[in-house]
Amino acid sequence: MAGSVNKVILVGNVGKDPETRSFSNGGKVCNFSLATSETWRDKQSGERRESTQWHNIAIFNENLIKVVENYVNKGTKLYLEGQLQTRKWQDRDGNDRWTTEVVLQRFRGELVLLDSRGSGGDRGGYDQSRNVSDYSSGGQKSASAQEGPMESFELDDEIPF
């Protein structure tokens, strides 16, 4: 096998207000849970069914943490891309535990706010969806990041082949 891919794409609603913690080395991490739901109609009863999955999210990118602190709270709809990571830790009783979470690393990951202004809670939001993840190491936005509301672009219908 030439390589492997570890990529997770989720669209869901934030389950609780994000919590940010600082490390002694000056770094930060922001944690929250994200709910994704699937609905279907039961073939036998005809009833509508729903299944919700909860995902633990950890963000280490300081630029994304600033956006989350200012614009994300419980109920906010997000699109995010990250990687699955499993880590081992010990509880208060000394028992080994494992946690699998979706991680947006310092120089990787994507976060898009999907709520319009006012629908994501009391902190407000953007007028339209904004991509806020494409930051370079110097804190400058790359060409693919959006500075303002997403604009409508007309695509050329002619295919060059």
Image (cartoon, rainbow, N blue to C red):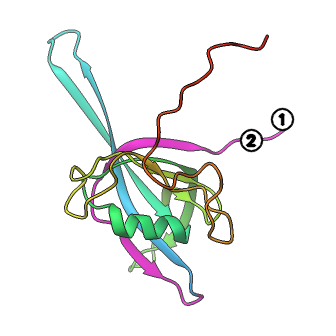
Say which residue appears at 51% left-offset and 41% top-offset: 9
Q: Quadrant of the C terminus?
A: top right
Asked which quadrant contains residue 133, the reply is: bottom right
Q: Position of residue 142 (x, y in %)?
A: 65, 56
Q: Is residue 95 left or right of residue 48?
A: right
Q: Is residue 42 left or right of residue 137?
A: left
Query: Mark 2 highlights which residue?
Result: 4
Type of amino acid under label 1:
Met
Say which residue appears at 55% left-offset and 67% top-offset: 88
Residue at the farthest bottom position: 24
Q: Position of residue 105 (x, y in %)?
A: 60, 62
How far apart, in angstroms, are the residues tagged by discs 2 and 1? 8 Å
Q: Which residues are magenta?
A: 1-25
Q: Secondary structure at mark 1?
A: loop
Residues under numbered marks 2 and 1 in contact, where contact means CB atoms less than 8 Å apart: yes
Say which residue appears at 36% left-offset and 72% top-offset: 19
Query: Mark 1 highlights which residue?
Result: 1
Type of amino acid under label 2:
Ser
Q: Is residue 113 left or right of residue 157?
A: left
When the figure is inspected, residue 89 is found, relative to residue 113, above or below; the finding is below
When the figure is inspected, residue 136 is found, relative to residue 79, above or below; the finding is below
Based on the picture, tell me whether residue 20 belongs to the magenta stretch. yes
Looking at the rendered structure, the number of numbered marks drawn on it comes to: 2
Q: Position of residue 100 (x, y in %)?
A: 50, 56
When the figure is inspected, residue 37 is found, relative to residue 145, above or below; the finding is above
Q: Which mark is residue 77?
A: none
When the figure is inspected, residue 17 is found, relative to residue 10, above or below; the finding is below
Say which residue appears at 56% left-offset and 86% top-offset: 26
Q: Quadrant of the N terminus?
A: top right
Query: Which of these two is toward me, 131 or 8?
Result: 131
The answer to whether one can see residue 34 in this image is yes
